[in-house]
Amino acid sequence: MSIEVEIVSPEKVLFSRAVEMAVIPGLEGDIAAMPDRAPMMLLLRGGVVELYENGVVTERFFVAGGFADMTATRCTILADQATALADLSVADAQKRLAGLEASYDAADKMNVPALDLLMAKMQSARAEIEAAGGEAVKAA
C-alpha cells in the first residue's frame, strides 16, 4: 500500500507521487504519514522530510516550517520554504543564521511574539545547516 505525498512551497510543487511512507518534522516531533492513518493536521518545524519506498529513504527535502494535512490516503505538506537536500547551501544558511542572531540580539526583549518568531527562524536555519552537512551550531 502507498500514500500520495505532495510537497508544496510558495514557488512550486516540489514532489507529488505515491510512496510507502513519509517521515515529517512536526513541531512536537517527527511523525510518519502512512496509509490508513487517522486524519490530522500538524505544524512543521524546520527539518527534513524523508520519503520511503521498499523500506529505504529514496528522497529527502528540507522544509523551513509550514504545516501538513494527513488523511488515510494522502499527505499534503505546505511548506514555508522547501528545497531538495542536494540543493542546500551551508554557507547561505550560516549567513542567514548570523543575520537572524544579530536581529535577535537587537530586538526588544519585551516583544515576546517577535522573539518567538526569530527563535523559530533560527531553529530552522540551524536545522538547514545540519541537513546540508554543516557543523551543528550551538543554540542561542
Image (tube, grey):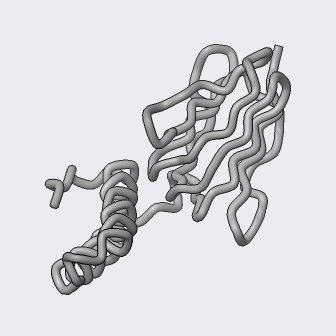
The reply, left or right, for residue 122 in relation to residue 55 is: left
Specify the quadrant of the image occupied by residue 114: bottom left
- Residue at 52% of width from left, 56% of height from top? 65
Q: Residue 58: x and y, percent?
A: 62, 32
Q: What is the quadrant of the N terminus in the image?
A: top right
Instruction: From the top left corner, tell me how far across and down residue 44 is, in percent.
Output: 53, 47
| Up-down relation of residue 127 to residue 59 (above or below) | below
Q: Is 33 placed left or right of 27 in the picture?
A: right
At x 75% / y 36%, what residue is drawn? 75
Q: On the rendered image, what quadrant is the C terminus found in?
A: bottom left
* Relative vertical location of residue 53 with respect to residue 93 in this rendering, above or below: above
Q: Residue furthest front?
A: 110
> How far from the left and from the top, in percent, is residue 130?
32, 50
Q: Position of residue 81 (x, y in %)?
A: 58, 64
Residue 20, quarter of picture: top right
Left or right, 5 with respect to 57, comes to right
Observer-nearest of 9 and 37 = 37
Residue pictured at 74% horizontal, 20% vertical: 38
Total numbered circles: 0
Residue sitting at x 36%, y 62%:
125
Compared across the picture, whether 2 is left or right of 122 comes to right
